[in-house]
Amino acid sequence: MIENNETIDEFLARHADEVEEAVRKAAALEIMPRWRRLAAHEVDEKAGPHDLVTDADRKAELYLTDVLSALLPGSAVVGEEAVHANPASYEAIRGEAPVWIVDPVDGTRQFVHGDPGFCTLVALAHHGVVHASWTYAPADDRLATAVRGRGAFLDGERLYAGPPEPGRDLRVATSHPDYTTDEQKHALRGLRTPGVAPRACGSAGLEYLAVARGESDATAFSWEAAWDHAAGLLLVEEAGGTHLTRTGEPFRITGDNDLPFTAARDAATARQVVALLSGEA
């Protein structure tokens, strides 16, 4: 717990390893035993056939909620499944208490289909600022971490996104058309231009990791749910990248962003993507 006016940085210095352990244990206990073993009654639809939830999502989120809230008494937990059950609980992101932002299985559709492209996302934020993040891909046993001002790491090795290679098409992961409005579809069509190679995204968390590793150049996403973005945005920032909305401002996890927005390997790429999304290029 935070004691004697301890800062979040001091809390992380003492407890980051325990958060990592909690993320790994949630996957080991509740997610991986169900991967490729899901029964029909363990999978449900939320908003539609592309918006799925499983017992792994629910149980892993409950595990993380219990452990993380005990680790930092007085903190709030905003988890995807809890917010689905009680939308008002999302408001904790804008509150005074530190908040854990949790996506227990990011890429549930891939998880259900037996694909390894899913991950567990945890971020710790306060007053709208993300201070630390954990991105765990349990099928591959890869863990990416970031602490604000201290860098981004994958399995202990420093990540550096770097600028895209000159002369090569920009690789941009974009929102799936099923999750975009007509206006957003129009904006995303701006990426269909020479020099850009857009494709539909998979797990948002793993797309952010690909940008932080320099394997992908940018994202162009059209939704605001903080559990999908908080961990990855800090990871990209700490790897040397940046993120921008169409107004030229950084994405805010507290909402009211001009969508779609981008996260990119470097500032020049972010500006280029935003210009294309805004019809200015």
Image (cartoon, rainbow, N blue to C red):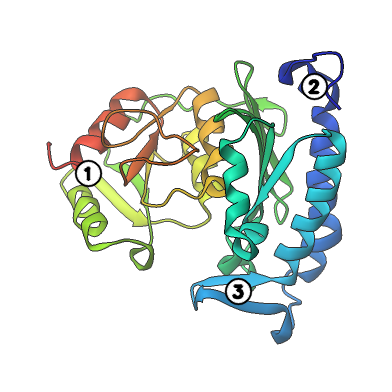
Name the element at disc 2: helix
Front one among 240 and 93: 93
| Tag nearer the camera, 1 or 3 | 1
Residue where numbered disc 2 is placed:
11
Q: Earlier in the sequence, mark 1 or mark 3?
A: 3
Residue nearest the observer in this picture, 87 or 62: 87
Identify residue for label 3. 113
Quarter placement of the C terminus: top left
Disc 1 and disc 3 in contact, CB within 8 angstroms: no
**Is 106 situated above or below 74?**
below
Alpha carbon separation for disc pair 2 and 3: 38 Å
Residue 68 in the figure: left or right of residue 116: right
In this view, the residue farthest toward the left is: 280
In the image, residue 150 above or below residue 188 = above
At horizontal 77% and vertical 62% (from top left) the residue drawn is: 31
Q: In which quarter of the image is residue 181?
A: bottom left
Q: How far apart are marks 1 and 3 (CA)?
A: 32 Å
Name the residue beneath numbered marker 1. 277
- Estimate the x, y position of residue 205 in percent, counting from the top left: 56, 47
Residue 239 placed where, x, y %?
A: 53, 25
State the SS at label 1. Answer: helix
Q: Which residue is drawn at 62% across and 56% down?
A: 80
In the image, is 102 to the left or to the right of 235? right
* Residue neighbourhood size for the residue with mark 1, other residues' Cα within 10 Å, grouped as few (<14), some (14–19), many (≥20): many
Nearest the eye: 169 or 243 = 243
